[in-house]
Each structure stands twice: as structure tokens, then as C-alpha cells.
């Protein structure tokens, strides 16, 4: 970027030539290299008003959905929307309006229990409204759990209950990333109680994906945060990513790969932290063992000074000191 700004007459053409050369060979690129190119290129364009001769690549629309060049253009546009906003990116491709087909949907939530769009009200709308009022009224997680277990679960079963609870919590947390974090911190126990095992967590992920089906970024963020708060296990995420509906997405979208990559990265970081912790604890144990050995040696040395006088033991050290040494040795051990 600095070179493009410093040498505007020469360097941008070099960069553009490199991008075109890589685009021609995109089918031969390693997947990780392709993803890095997508991330770099979208970021680069965001620093230059998203200007690019998109009409040169408009032909990708005639390629199959799984074609690497078509997927590349689609994913670059998706990343650009994250770095800016939908209307701005749409404006940037006005020289190739047909490419609008590859733009991601506008990232609005897919809330099942909305009443604003004229949907017919069901019994679940009433439950969702009641839960919404509880959350907005700052009901505790324990109160919400009790209400679910006593009222909702017996009447509606697990899957319908899970759908209502997750949809409402995500909807309340949909205003911003901070709202999402607040909701997960406050009501994470509700999700943990509902989804303690692998199979139920897979249903939970499917519900999150359904709510944020129009936003890959928010789907990935929500799942990543839920894993961070131990509401989801890494194995549940991996099993969901490799479920039949997602396998169909493998070659036409980076959505499952991003979620999978986040889970693996978080797992690796957690393992690294635990290894450091184990190493630190081992060192602490050695230090503690040495301290215990020293305290025991001091106690033994004092006890060895006991002498016999007229058949009765007499302490060489004062009773107070002996008591202190024994207490110190016990604590060290």
C-alpha cells in the first residue's frame, strides 16, 4: 500500500499485474494461499476506494458455482462488505453490474419469530415475547432456566424450545458485537443447561447458522464466542462443519472453512496455554518439594538434639521453636 501511494505512476500497475497473474492460476493455488490472497486483496482495495476493473472478471458468472475464479470474486466481495458496507461495494462494481449476483445478502438477521413482516402468529411467538420481556427485565439466568424447565420444555419439547431460546437471545444480541457478548455472558448458563452434550450442541450451531444465514461474519463470530465461553465444544463445531448440508458448501463458499479454521485455531491456542500452565505447575511442584525437603531436614536436625536425662527426654531447642518447625514442615509438605 505504501509503495502504491509513493509511486502512483508505476507500482499500482505492478500490483495489478501480479493479481491478474495469480487470478489466472487460482485453480492451481493451495487453498490456504487462495484464502490469504482473498484477505490481502480485499484489504488492499479497501484502502483505495475499492477501485478495480471488475468488468474484466465479469465472465466468472458463466462458470460453475464451484469454479475457483468465481468463488474468488465472490469471497473478495464478501470480505469487502465486512470492511465497508453493502451499498458501497455494490457501487464499486457498477462497471460490471451483473456481479451483484455474487454479492453476499444484506447481513440482516433471519429472525423466525418476528411479527413485523405480517407473519402469522403462533404459540412460539407468545413464548418468544415472554422470554424477551424476561431478558429485557434483567431476569437472572437461574430464573430463566427454571421457567424453561417448568413451563416451556414439558409443553413443546427440546428442539422447539432450543429454537425459541437461541433465536431470542441472538436477536437481543444482534445490535452489535458488544450486545452479543453481554447476552452470552449473562445467559450462557441457560445455553449450557439446554445443550450439555455433543448432539444438542450441533443443533445449537445449526440454529445460530439459521439466524445469521445472511451474514457469514456474524455466524463465525457467534460460534467463535460461544466456543470461547465453553458453550460449544470444538468437536461439536467440527461435526457440524462436516455434516451433509455443509459439505455441499465446501467448494462454493468459504463459510464452513472460516468456522472450522477458527475452531482449530482456538483449540491450538488453548492447548498451548495449557501446556505452558502444566510446565509452570511442574516447576512449582519441584520448588515446593525442595522447600518441603529443607523444612523436613530442619525439623529432623532439631529432633536429633533431643537428649535423655534421668531417662526423660529433654529438648535441646525450645518447645516453641520445635512446634514452629513442625508446623512449617507440615505446611511445606
Image: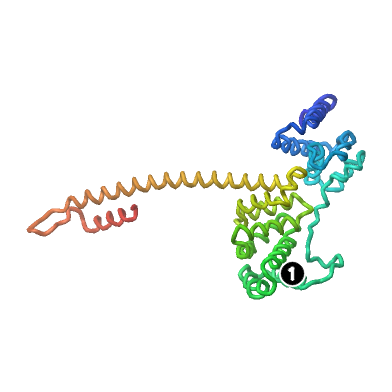
- The image quadrant that residue 37 belongs to is top right
Outermost residue on the front side: it is 244
| Lateral position of residue 3 relative to residue 271, left or right | right
Q: How many numbered discs? A: 1
Question: Residue 84: horizontal and vertical position, in percent?
Answer: 81, 45
Check the image and tell me how it is coloured: rainbow
Q: Can residue 328 be seen in this view?
A: yes
Question: Residue 75: horizontal and vertical position, in percent?
Answer: 78, 42
Q: Is residue 6 visible?
A: no
Question: Residue 263: horizontal and vertical position, in percent?
Answer: 64, 48
| Quarter of the rendering occupied by the N terminus | top right
| Lateral position of residue 92 relative to residue 175, left or right | right
Residue at position x 62%, y 45% from top?
A: 264
Examine the rendered structure and indicate whether residue 95 appears above or below residue 194. Answer: above
Examine the rendered structure and indicate whether residue 65 appears above or below residue 202. Answer: above
- Secondary structure under tag 1 reads helix
Outermost residue on the top side: it is 10
Residue at position x 26%, y 58% from top?
A: 323
| Lateral position of residue 42 relative to residue 195, left or right | right
The one of 169 and 328 positioned closer to us in this rendering: 169
Question: Residue 27: horizontal and vertical position, in percent?
Answer: 76, 33
Q: Residues within 10 Å of mark 1 (few under 14, many from 20)?
A: many
Examine the rendered structure and indicate whether residue 189 appears above or below residue 281. Answer: below
To which residue does mark 1 refer?
Answer: 128
The one of 258 and 269 positioned closer to us in this rendering: 258
The one of 76 and 256 positioned closer to us in this rendering: 256
The one of 110 and 93 positioned closer to us in this rendering: 110
Amino acid at each position: 500500500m505504501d509503495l502504491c501511494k509513493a509511486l502512483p505512476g508505476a507500482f499500482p500497475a505492478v500490483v495489478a499485474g501480479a493479481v491478474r497473474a495469480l487470478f489466472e492460476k487460482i485453480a492451481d493455488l493451495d487453498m490456504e494461499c487462495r484464502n490469504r490472497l482473498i484477505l490481502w486483496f480485499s484489504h488492499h482495495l479497501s484502502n483505495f476506494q475499492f477501485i478495480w476493473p471488475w468488468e474484466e472478471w465479469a465472465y466468472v458468472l458463466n462458470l460453475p458455482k464451484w469454479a475457483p475464479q468465481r468463488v474468488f470474486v465472490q469471497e473478495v466481495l464478501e470480505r469487502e462488505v465486512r470492511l465497508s458496507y453493502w451499498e458501497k461495494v455494490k457501487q464499486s462494481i457498477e462497471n460490471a453490474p451483473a456481479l451483484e449476483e455474487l454479492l453476499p445478502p444484506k447481513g440482516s438477521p433471519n429472525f423466525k419469530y418476528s411479527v413485523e413482516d405480517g407473519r402469522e402468529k403462533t404459540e412460539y411467538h407468545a413464548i418468544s415475547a415472554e422470554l424477551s420481556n424476561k431478558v429485557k427485565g434483567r431476569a437472572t439466568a437461574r430464573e430463566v432456566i427454571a421457567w424453561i424447565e417448568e413451563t416451556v420444555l414439558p409443553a413443546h419439547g427440546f428442539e422447539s424450545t432450543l429454537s425459541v431460546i437461541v433465536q431470542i437471545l441472538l436477536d437481543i444480541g444482534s445490535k452489535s458485537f458488544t450486545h452479543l457478548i453481554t447476552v452470552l455472558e449473562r445467559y450462557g448458563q441457560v445455553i449450557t443447561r439446554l445443550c450439555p452434550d455433543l448432539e444438542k450442541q450441533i443443533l445449537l450451531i445449526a440454529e445460530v447458522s439459521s439466524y445469521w444465514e445472511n451474514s457469514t461474519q456474524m455466524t463465525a463470530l457467534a460460534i467463535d464466542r460461544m466456543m470461547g465461553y465453553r458453550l460449544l465444544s470444538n468437536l461439536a463445531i467440527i461435526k457440524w462443519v462436516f455434516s451433509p448440508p455443509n459439505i455441499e458448501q465446501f467448494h462454493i463458499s468459504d463459510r464452513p472453512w472460516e468456522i472450522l479454521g477458527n475452531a482449530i485455531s482456538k483449540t491450538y491456542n488453548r492447548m498451548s496455554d495449557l501446556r505452558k500452565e502444566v510446565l509452570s505447575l511442574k516447576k512449582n511442584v519441584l520448588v515446593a518439594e525442595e522447600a518441603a525437603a529443607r523444612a523436613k531436614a530442619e525439623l529432623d536436625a532439631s529432633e536429633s538434639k533431643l537428649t535423655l536425662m534421668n531417662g526423660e527426654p529433654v529438648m535441646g531447642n525450645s518447645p516453641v521453636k520445635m512446634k514452629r518447625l513442625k508446623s512449617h514442615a507440615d505446611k511445606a509438605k
